Image: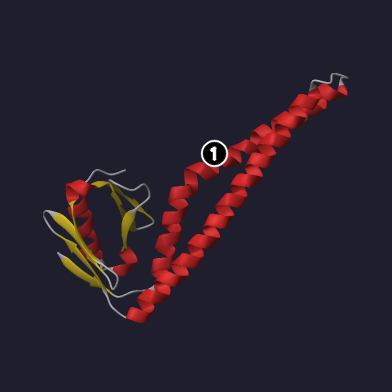
Amino acid sequence: MKIEIPFDKDVFRKQMLLSFSVVWKANLKKNRRRLIWIVLSFFTGLYVYSTGDMMGLIFFFLAMLVFINFINYEWFYQKNKKKYLRILSEISESFENAGQNTIWEFEEDHLGYKDHRFETRIKWSAFKNYRIIDNNLFIYSDTVSGNAFVIGLEEVELDIWNNIKEIVAGKLSMA
């Protein structure tokens, strides 16, 4: 099955932000859990110190170290998100300037993809799995973490969307 999809800047941005969120979700959740340790260490230190035990200072110190790690990770995340958004803007502009459709081929032995920058045919065995998030199909490469081909219901008609999901489900396992 061959599909031509005109470039839509808004759909592209939504898909790429969704992809970014999926990749960062677990680490952000882990980092936000650090807040629990910060609060627990701080109040434990406060309580222990208020009883006259200098051991409370160790808990304050621990809370500060965890807080510094929390802030550093948040800063790292924000820096990477800003960079990602800048790159997305550049890519989006290049697609708009090219004015070409993307071409998807869902064949028996491979997935084909073509845009103004490159053309590729990848055997289904080179993919790890797939998942559907917010009516967007993510087909994950076996070689690179977070690297996915993304196609959404917004881009195609419902019957084509259902055919794509059937083809991919027959070739790959769901994540």
The location of residue 28, given as percent across then percent down, is 54, 45
Residue under the image location 12 percent in, 53 percent down = 109
The residue most toward the left is: 108
Q: In this view, does 4 lie above or below 76?
A: below
Q: How is the image coloured?
A: secondary structure
Residue under the image location 30 percent in, 75 percent down = 6
| Number of marks | 1
For this rendering, which residue is in front, 34 or 122?
122
Residue under the image location 38 percent in, 75 percent down = 94
Q: Which image quadrant is residue 14 in?
A: bottom left
- On screen, residue 119 versus residue 47, left or right, reads left
User: Label 1: which residue?
Assistant: 30
For this rendering, which residue is in front, 156 or 158?
156
- On screen, residue 117 versus residue 53, left or right, reads left
- On screen, residue 57 versus residue 129, left or right, reads right
Q: Name the residue type under label 1.
A: Lys
Q: Which image quadrant is residue 102 in?
A: bottom left
Where is the N terminus found, in terms of image quarters?
Answer: bottom left
